[in-house]
Image: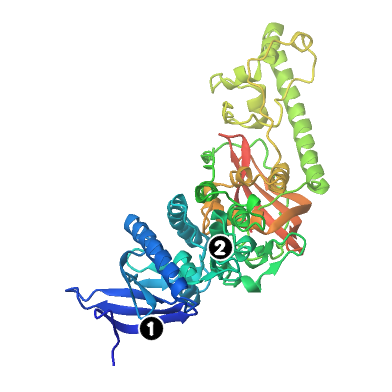
Amino acid sequence: MQIQLNNRYRVIRTLGGGGFGETFLAEDTQMPSNRRCVIKQLRPIQNNPQIYQLVQERFQREAAILEELGGATDQIPTLYAYFQTDGQFYLVQEWVEGDTLTAKVQQVGFLSESSVREILLNLLPILEYVHNKRIIHRDIKPDNIILRHRDGKPVLIDFGAVRESMGTVMNSQGLPTSSIVIGTPGFMPSEQAAGRPLYSSDLYSLGITAIYLLTGKQPQDLEIDSRTGEIIWHRHALSVSPTMAAVIDRAIAYHPRDRFATAREMLDALHGAASFPATVPYIQPPIAVTTPVAPIQPPAVNTPPSPTLPNTVAVSPGTSSQSSNQGSGQRGIFLASLITGGLIGAAIIIGFALNRSPQSVTQSTTVSDATTNTQAENTPTPRQSAVSSTPEPTPTNDEPRDIVPPLRSPFPTNSDSSPTPSTTQPQVERPSPEQAVQNYYATINQGEYQAAWNQLSPNYQNNRRLHPNGYLSYIDWWGGRVQSVDVEQVNLVQANTETATVDAQFKYMMKSGKIVPGSVRFSLLWDAENSKWVVSDAN
């Protein structure tokens, strides 16, 4: 037999029940569409005529408030009607088709940070409006937030004020008071449990709800710091960014004075947590095809990289020593090149001396390096003759000059004692690839994650395997999981004017207390536009 309430609402099924009454899904038989609605049945905890009159007055007052709230926003159910019969009170509200956040987590598991942020961004303006009306919800929890099917927006249901009116009793002085505490253990803060809710109490409940969505953990499953009363939850949500975690931490602070004072303040902080500075634009320098002064190819070091943790950016900080063997080998090759070039240059100059007047010899040795680079191609210079018949490209402001100094005559001339001022531009001191890797790790150890992110090439930043959410994934790892990185060794494998390969060995000092060794081979590109090495790959 179907139940019909108030000779109008046909009950379809019971949605839930508790100490205050039951909730039904019903059809409005007096509407042409048989519109579905939710009917909340509320009953006073005391069957007392005097109490009943007070409850009735409070119920009407709270129903009027619900009508105003529901009429101002579509994220609070609309109040269609209210009535009372047989000593019980009924609210008729809009039926919101959707899933509660509890049901959502049960269906798909815990939610991503971006999904939780979106829910908070949609709910906080509603709470700001409610608080501006001097109303505290008092029972924010996953069961009382519905994700509406038609647009995915969160809808806030089941305000606690109406239920509190059902708990009205007379105290020992004969005055009406509420004998019940509205709220759900675990989701309400200590002051609300003591019967003194504040606006920040709702923000606390919202923060606990966010933790449940991010971890799937009920409040009772989380540890409490016995010294501070703060909830320990970060270990269950290692992928959450430090900025998002900081917003939640402040919302759930034990003392109200340490929380956000208003929903607007929390909303502004949340917007700040989602707004990261734009990265510095990176322009990959063109690869110049030039004739090298001398092919310098140090033997490749075939050191297999040690495995690193999954889904990490194996590009990180620290200070360590360079490889002495590699460095001494390169210096030896350069020294041999200089000596050989000097002897060849001397022979050429002697040849010029035998065939030209002394004035010509002096001119050929006093000409600056910049001048020789601008001479006609058919006029040999000491530097060109010592290397090849192909002239070297003239260095520009954007490209560093050759690290090998120009060859000069071994014989003293008038120009050596009184050199002509050079017209060349000063050399740009380029950092070594090894130092660039060390500086990168040091930047991360100092917590300057944006600066470190800007030391990655765009292609590497857009590597969706390592950075599925771009910079958010990057900071989730370095800021959320890694305490610091101890770089033990950095070795140069190969380098030229445009690219370099560097091997690094290090240890991750994790925030969990673990120490994880790692080994990475970096591929670097020289960014002439910004005069720095950038990481193009790491494996």
Mark 2 crowd level (few <14, some 14–19, many ≥20, 10 Å Cα): many
Screen quadrant of the N terminus? bottom left
Pick the residue in front: 86 or 207: 86
Q: Residue at x 69, y 43 (%)?
A: 436
Pick the residue in front: 69 or 442: 69
Horizontal placement of 65 versus 289: left or right? Answer: left
Report the disc number at residue 205: 2
Place of residue 268 in the rendered image (x, y in percent of width and height, measured from the top left): 51, 46
Pick the residue in front: 83 or 336: 83
Q: Which label sits in the foreground, 2 or 1?
A: 1
Residue type of the residue flagged with mark 1: Thr
Mark 2 vs mark 1, CA separation in Å: 27 Å
Pick the residue in front: 100 or 64: 64
Q: Residue at x 35, y 65 (%)?
A: 77
Mark 1 crowd level (few <14, some 14–19, many ≥20, 10 Å Cα): few
- Please tell me in which quadrant of the rendered image residue 398 appears: top right
| Mark 1 residue element | strand
| Mark 2 residue element | helix
Report the disc number at residue 14: 1
Residue type of the residue flagged with mark 2: Ser
